Amino acid sequence: MYDANNIKISERLKELRKEKGMTLEEVANAIYKSKPTIYKYEEGSLEPNLEALILLANLFEVNIESFFEKENERKTTRDVN
């Protein structure tokens, strides 16, 4: 699991999915992955590649950088506009 300076992609992904009220299956279908793959992303046993991160960022309407920022540094696309 990626964890530089307490940044955890898996935790951010789970947080975003729950904020949107989506199931693992809904996220999987939206980004053309399997439900077990999304589960592995969230538990940290598999890291999403760049293509998956872009699709996830678009799905959750966040900047891709938000997967790599600490919680207090995060901005959504709404914050930028």
Image (cartoon, rainbow, N blue to C red):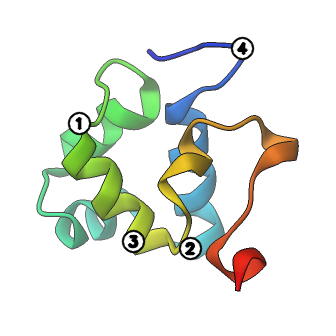
> Secondary structure under badge 2?
loop
Q: Calculate the distance from the C-alpha at mark 2 to the C-alpha at mark 4.
A: 28 Å
Q: Nearer the viewer, mark 1 or mark 2?
A: 1
Three-letter amino acid code of the residue under disc 1: Asn
The x, y position of residue 34, in whole percent, is 13, 51
At label 2, the amino acid type is Gly
Q: Residues within 10 Å of mark 4 (few under 14, many from 20)?
A: few
| Residue with the mark numbered 1 | 49
- Check disc 4 and report the residue beneath it: 5
Considering only vertical position in the picture, is 67 above or below 17? above
Residue at image x 68%, y 69%?
A: 76
* Placement of 27 over or under 38, stated as above or below: below
**Outermost front residue:** 81
N-term mark: 2 or 4: 4
CA distance for labels 1 and 4: 20 Å
Q: Amino acid at mark 3?
A: Asn
Badge 3: how crowded within 10 Å, few (<14), some, or many (20+)?
Answer: some
Q: Are marks 2 and 3 in contact (CB under 8 Å)?
A: no
Q: Which mark is residue 72?
A: none
Say if 61 sits above or below 50 in the image. below
Q: Residue at x 52, y 75 (%)?
A: 61
